[in-house]
Image (spheres, coloured by chain):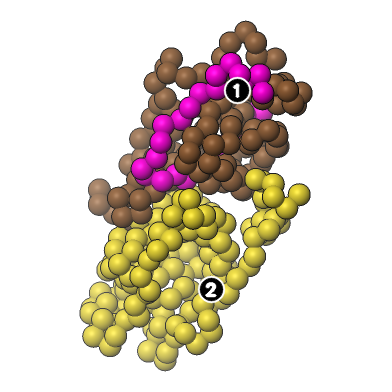
Chain colours: A brown, B yellow
Amino acid sequence: MSDSPIRKALPDFHWERVAALRYKEEGSAPFRAVTRQVLFGDDALRCEWRYFEVSPGGYSTLERHAHAHAVMILRGAGRCLVGDRVYAVAERDLVAVPPLAWHQFRADAHAPLGFLCLVNQERDRPQLPAADDLAALRRVAEVAAFIRTGDDNDA
Amino acid sequence: MSDSPIRKALPDFHWERVAALRYKEEGSAPFRAVTRQVLFGDDALRCEWRYFEVSPGGYSTLERHAHAHAVMILRGAGRCLVGDRVYAVAERDLVAVPPLAWHQFRADAHAPLGFLCLVNQERDRPQLPAADDLAALRRVAEVAAFIRTGDDNDA
């Protein structure tokens, strides 16, 4: 029944009547092996509730924006940059990404990293780091080793 | 570190720095064996992201309101009323509760039912069913057998 209020979970972290989308347009920003599913994008809620999954070895875009993220890890394990620190994360951990904090999620080499991510429906576009932003981030050795920017300067 | 952006998952579906709260004031509305945890209640998001857990045999309040709910089952199994139908739900299933739809969640007899529930931060108060609402709901046999109102008329 297409208007059922229930969308059953399907194998491998998919859902009935939820499309697996490209994370971003290829070439628009650096990332590797990330998918996006919009679970709820309801006008009444004024929020979007999404599920992202980073394949083993993959990473989301290193970016920041004025809107906040509320995140719960749903599958697997990995690490994330929030601000100027790197944190190990695993199933059901909560991550608060404050406005304008640089952030990036990376899956472990042998596990995917799937996470729920809540955002305001109306929100600003992500900003990519300029050369001086990257230089500032790389002043912390742990961050320098962690971040992935899609170029040969990646550690 | 109290201002870390990460709150690690703890055993038994609790989290660092997240308080287990009463679901509602006792006596304010019929329910049985439900706890509430507010995972994110951020002004920037204008939403609250909560985790409710219904113990085996317990039930949430039968109610409706003008605001919508976006729900994901996170633990266990049970059934829920949405509108005039009852649905079986299990881990990772999605449930959309539209504005003014009567709804109630019940855990199975031998499993808890834990679920994430997203709402607008500013929202109207729940309405309880009046006698004529209950009579209308009970016209559907499946619904009549399902709903729990805390009184002796429960099936």
Q: Is residue B114 visible?
A: no
Disc 2: which chain? B
Q: Secondary structure at mark 2?
A: loop
Q: Are marks 2 and 1 on the same chain?
A: no
| Magenta segment boundaries in residue numbering | A107-136
Q: Is residue A148 left or right of residue A68?
A: right
Which residue is farthest top? Answer: A152
Which amino acid type is marked by label 2? Tyr
Task: From the viewer's side, name the closer residue of A149 and B88.
Answer: A149
Image vertical order of residue B140 relative to residue A139, above or below: below
Image vertical order of residue A42 relative to residue B142, above or below: above
- The structure residue drawn at horizontal position 62% and vertical position 8%, both measured from the top left corner, is A152
- The structure residue drawn at horizontal position 32% and vertical position 49%, both measured from the top left corner, is A42
Q: Is residue A113 magenta?
A: yes
Disc 1: which chain? A
Q: Residues within 10 Å of mark 1 (few under 14, many from 20)?
A: few
Q: Which quadrant holds the C terminus of chain A?
A: top right
On residue B23, which mark appears?
2
- The structure residue drawn at horizontal position 68% and vertical position 58%, both measured from the top left corner, is B17
Task: From the viewer's side, name the closer residue of A22 and A25.
Answer: A25
Residue B88 location (% of width, % of height): 41, 60
Residue A68 location (% of width, % of height): 50, 43
- Disc 2/disc 1 C-alpha distance (Å): 45 Å
